[in-house]
Amino acid sequence: MQSQKTIILIVSVLLLVFIMQPNARAHTNDNKYSSARNYERTYTFYVQHEYRWFSMHACSLYVSVPPSLYDYYRSQTHSVSSEGGYSKFVTPNAVRSIAENIQNVTSNAPYSDEQFANAVLKLVHQISYVKSNAKYPVEAIVDNSGDCDVLSYLAASIMKAGGLDVVLLHYKERSPTHMNVGVYLPHTPVYGKWWMKPKGYEYNGKKYWVAECTSEGNWKVGDQPSSLAGAKAWIVSLETCEKSSPAHVSSSLDSSLTPSSISINLSPGPSNVEDRARTLNISGSISPAFSGQRVIMYVTQDGSSSKIFGTVFTDPFGNYSLTWNFTSTGTYYIRTSWSGFLNYAASDSETLTVFVGFYQPLVEFEVPEYYWGTGPDYTSAGASAAAYYGLISQGVKEFLEINLLGDGILLSGEFIILKSEKTIARSEQTITIPSYEQKYRMPRSRRPMTITVPEQTIKIPSYEQKPKHHLGFILRHNGGSNYSVSVRRLNDYNISQTTKQLEGKDTAFINASMGTTENTWYKVVAKMSKDEITAKLYDQNGTLLQSIATRDYAISISELGILMAYDKDTVIAFRNLKVETLDQPTQPVGGNHTTVYRLEWKRGG
């Protein structure tokens, strides 16, 4: 009888170990984008509803992360100057939906706080342990990897979002150093390994129990790895952790999230000439059309960190609208995001690439005759005037340059020219020319005479008519299977040279300025291969406005251009801009295989 009980006990323990193995039931959906282009993950955790060992209930948690939230945290500073700085990586609000869904299961279970903490540990144990630099929790979820500190930041964030009192435990005297989480419970842990005495550390009159976040050992609250026996832990308070986040991941229990969508559009707003400020109206809608939903607008300028520009709530029809004021020129990337609602996944709008033109009009001016001398004295004396003229003339500017290998290339995208409502009247600008020394040699004199020219102030009148700039989409066949695409800004002189070049026998181009109007979206499609050269311009209704096409002489054409003129202070925006290579399939699967490259504009453009 005793032997039979022993066999039953052994079988029971083995079965329990199998159930609790981190890889036995856990599923992590590595990498992948949903139809809404989100990062999707699936985790499994367990809850014990009664005190019997075999009352385990397995739950699946589906998590969806919008790319904008991942990019936001990835662009934040990851440096730490002091031990207290670790707390900035704990971001409860960003993962609060995960905490809420776990609590929906654990809140009615015995020792609910402990079971909630153990469920969080079970989730974190499913993320691959990989030695890495510091990461925020959202990064850990998307990358599906991290080391002890990264996993601890994620676990502490979810636990804190669920209302637990937690700290970070830093074993900095150990080699290598280590980190895990300390969890305050009103009782001694009851679900830890029965052969281990629960381990905790006193801090501010409370005992914080060890919560090991690395996967080896299937640790529960109170379990301490033997490698940490006797190690001293420094307590890192989380009072200064992140109090709010721009958005949060979406999650659901036991069923996949339903995709959602958010649109984005822009239109010009009133502008202030004196303040040189301009305004754009950013608008759109979410689907499904929920009311009172928080929409975030992210703006990145010239490759800088992703910044939150504004927050707005949807109206009863799911629409939103923001006003964006800006004063500086350059390239901006704008997108909006919604964190989802109920079982709907979060979603991002497409990214609008916005070029803000230069405010200053091109000027002409005269300088004193002594500037037109020769030699080194002229070079130094005329530096201010020459540099100023060079600045405002703005020669060729490359926004994009990409080289591709394939049997052909296809460029497509939409653009809009946003007309400014302000007018620029004739005005005067002032430049200051510093004093300098000029040497003269008098007749029959052995030594030159030095004359000091005083500092001069020159008034520069501007043109009444705004000068034009041009945007060129240039596709090139560089020989063989080598193709390239460039997007360039050109001034009047550069465009005259470019059109002369494009009018050659081996070139083709269309002028997208013809037949287009401001504040309207247009689509451009251009294809270049050895068999076909086409360029087409469509309006927002899909009506073909202009086109060129050739097959007979396609092999002789090496350059295809699409040119568009605009005022210097005009705003131009692009969406759905991409390049595709047209590679012949290696197997007869039908049609061409297409590799898509979404364009990333050069920084500083």
Image (cartoon, grey):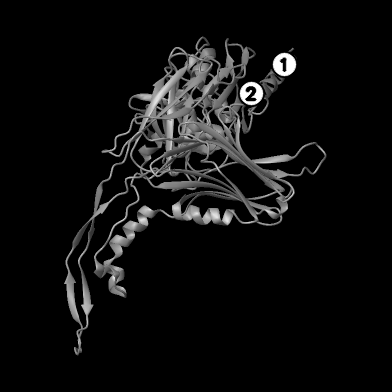
Q: Quadrant of residue 411?
A: top right
- Amino acid at the residue labelled 1: Ile
Q: Report how far apart the C-alphas of labels 2 and 1 lie in the structure.
A: 18 Å
| Residue shown at the point (46%, 38%) measured from the top left | 572
Which of marks 1 and 2 precedes in the sequence? 1
Neighbour class for label 2 at 10 Å: few (<14), some, many (≥20)?
Answer: some
* Residue 22 x %, y %: 63, 28
In the picture, the disc for residue 20 is 2
Looking at the picture, does residue 185 appear above or below residue 470?
above
Question: In front: 252, or 478?
Answer: 478
The residue tagged with tag 1: helix, strand or loop?
Answer: helix
Question: In front: 47, or 427?
Answer: 427
* Residue 362 x %, y %: 35, 51
- Amino acid at the residue labelled 2: Met
Is 49 situated left or right of 266 in this image?
right
In the picture, the disc for residue 545 is none
Question: In front: 115, or 426?
Answer: 426
Mark 1 highlights which residue?
A: 8
Looking at the picture, does residue 379 appear above or below residue 547?
below
| Residue shown at the point (52%, 40%) measured from the top left | 514
* Residue 433 x %, y %: 23, 61
* Residue 491 x %, y %: 44, 51
Is 115 situated left or right of 529 in this image?
left
> Can residue 91 be seen from the camera position used here?
no
> Can residue 435 be seen from the camera position used here?
yes
